[in-house]
Image: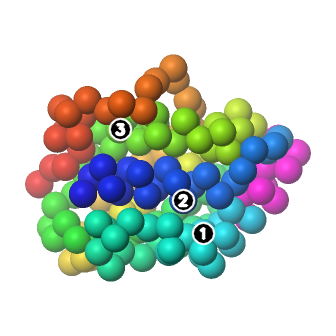
Amino acid sequence: MRIAITAACAATLSACGPGVTEQNLPEMLEGAANFINTDGQSMMSDEIGNARISARAEGGDTLVMRIENIPTGSYTFDPDAMRKMMRPHVCDQSGNRSVIDAGGKFRIEMISNTGKASPPFTIARCDRVSAKTRAEDVVQAFVA
């Protein structure tokens, strides 16, 4: 399930597309949020059950993606482990990388099917990372 959430987030965040600059960043983030709110749900994996996705642009430099109704019950995700696990997938998408290169950020908020919110996490830089996630990183991301 954590892998499905990771893949769905990365694919959905790629709505920004390439060609983002510091000058058009706010406009591109607004457009990406609109795309996610209208077409993003169809991009979510069936493995995430009835999860719902929404997005908004915030502060002119941040795209906030909110995923609700994730079937995790009272469990939460560790934000540091999720950031570490998500960064390679987010940064492997050229549109996402162009947002970060222009000074943009992605914040992800997750709420379980019981209303339990995991601490949000932000991806604001791309390191030299590979999309292959180590098994222990996946295990660390899911905490009680």
Residues at marks 1 and 3 touching, judged by CB atoms closer than 8 Å: no
Q: Is residue 3 above or below residue 21?
A: below
Q: Secondary structure at mark 3?
A: helix
In the picture, measured across the screen, residue 30 lies left or right of residue 92, that is: right
Q: Position of residue 122 (x, y in %)?
A: 48, 45
Q: Label 3 is placed on what type of residue? A: Met
Residue depicted at 23% across the width and 40% down the height: 138
- Ranked by sequence position, the earlier of labels 1 and 3 is 1
Q: Residue at x 11, y 54 (%)?
A: 144
Question: According to the image, label 1 marks what residue?
Answer: 36
Q: Which residue is mark 2?
A: 12
Q: Nearer the viewer, residue 143 or 47?
A: 47
**For discs 3 and 2, the disc positioned in front in the rendered view:** 2
Q: Is residue 125 left or right of residue 75?
A: right
Distance Cα–Cα, label 3 vs label 2: 16 Å
Q: Position of residue 43 (x, y in %)?
A: 50, 67
Residue 88 position in % (x across, y down): 46, 34
Residue span colored magenta: 22-30
Dot 1 or dot 2: first in sequence order is 2
- Spatial separation of the CA atoms under disc 1 and disc 3: 22 Å
| Residue placed furthest toward the left | 144
